Amino acid sequence: MTKTAFLFPGQGAQYVGMGRELAQQYPGVAQHFAQMNELLGFDLRHLCWEGPEEELKKTANQQPAILAFSVACLSLLTDAGIRPDVVAGLSLGEYSALVAAGVLTFEEAVPLVRKRGTYMQEAVPLGTGGMAAVLGLANEEVDRLCLQASAETGLHVEGANYNCPGQIVVSGHTEAVARLMELVAANHGKAVKLSVTAPFHSKLLVKAGEMLSGALDQLALRNAAIPVVANVTADYVTDRAQIRKLLVEQVSKPVRWEESIRRMLADGVDTFVEVGPSKALSGFLKKIDRSVRVFNIEDAQTLGKVLDSWGRVC
């Protein structure tokens, strides 16, 4: 029997124009963007649809923007009677997954991730930290080189996102990340500096997690109605107290995405739907297991493909 997982993208998935086409065709999508504006008190919808890109890329803007569009896409699937057996989201995407699982409402999640983005940006002074994508090396090799770069610089760099075989994102102090990139090249890998403004998912953001904890204390989280695979543990979680604890830890701990996908695969999930902007998670999936069915929804064409195919595959 088919088991379905919905996957939700994180930071970096945003692009100018996302959601505009669907909002023109589906009143429910338009309502999500309008509600986002009301919750935030400024016109983030305009940034999503018209830019400028540099403003949309700011952490405190892209987090609520991506979440709002992802949840709007989710509403189109649920309205069509398509529901998941399990959900997961990459970093920020975990909040969209928690909305899908009933842990947070949309009204709670939008301002919460706006605060999360602000805390993450303000935890480390600009220029102090950075991130890089490492390609072509095994996880263990990257971890070893991170330790070496940290020892040589007296600073810190660590694995931040274990996305798929041969792709790991590292995060830490700017100088340590630069040294890590040199070591990767010397060991026949490739490293690409990422255009981010903070060292996400590293121990440098512990302060941001502490600030997020205060924001979470003001919300009455609910137990998950469907299992959520948590970034920090790559395991299922439904208990609201455990979810809260993991959300605080997630800010400064690595995202174990490949392990999360493999956990779902081992439990019989054979159909994945990426819900929200871009197709990065679909790309990771194909590198983990090419045998599974993978869909995404971000515009009318991709929505149509899912709706047309669903009765045949599920």
Image (cartoon, grey):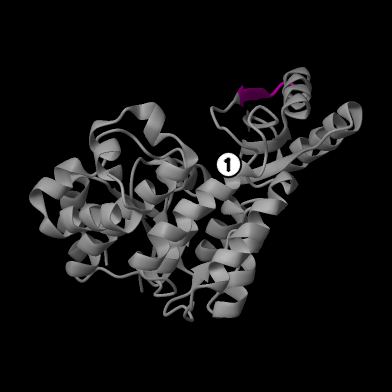
Q: Name above or below for residue 194 compared with residue 294.
A: above
Q: Does the stretch in magenta take in 191? A: yes
Residue depicted at 34% across the width and 65% down the height: 106
Residue 230, horizontal then vertical, whole percent = 57, 64
**In which quadrant of the rendered image does the N terminus lie?**
bottom left
Q: Name the side, left or right, on which 256 lies relative to 99.
A: right
Residue closest to the eye, 35 or 131: 35
Q: Name above or below for residue 53 compared with residue 291.
A: above
Q: Quadrant of residue 244?
A: bottom right
Residue 152, horizontal then vertical, whole percent = 90, 27
Residue depicted at 39% across the width and 51% down the height: 64
Residue 274, horizontal then vertical, whole percent = 36, 52
Q: Residue furthest front?
A: 41
Q: Does the stretch in magenta take in 154? A: no
Q: How many marks?
A: 1
Q: Which residue is mark 1?
A: 121
Prevailing SS of the magenta stretch: strand
Determine if residue 296 is in view. yes
Q: Name the side, left or right, on which 296 lies relative to 31.
A: right
Residue depicted at 15% across the width and 49% down the height: 23
**In which quadrant of the rendered image does the C terminus lie?**
bottom left
Please give the range of residues in magenta. 188-192
Residue closest to the eye, 79 or 38: 38
Residue depicted at 63% across the width and 58% down the height: 211
Q: Name above or below for residue 299 compared with residue 190.
A: below
Determine if residue 6 is in view. no
Q: Amino acid at mark 1?
A: Gln
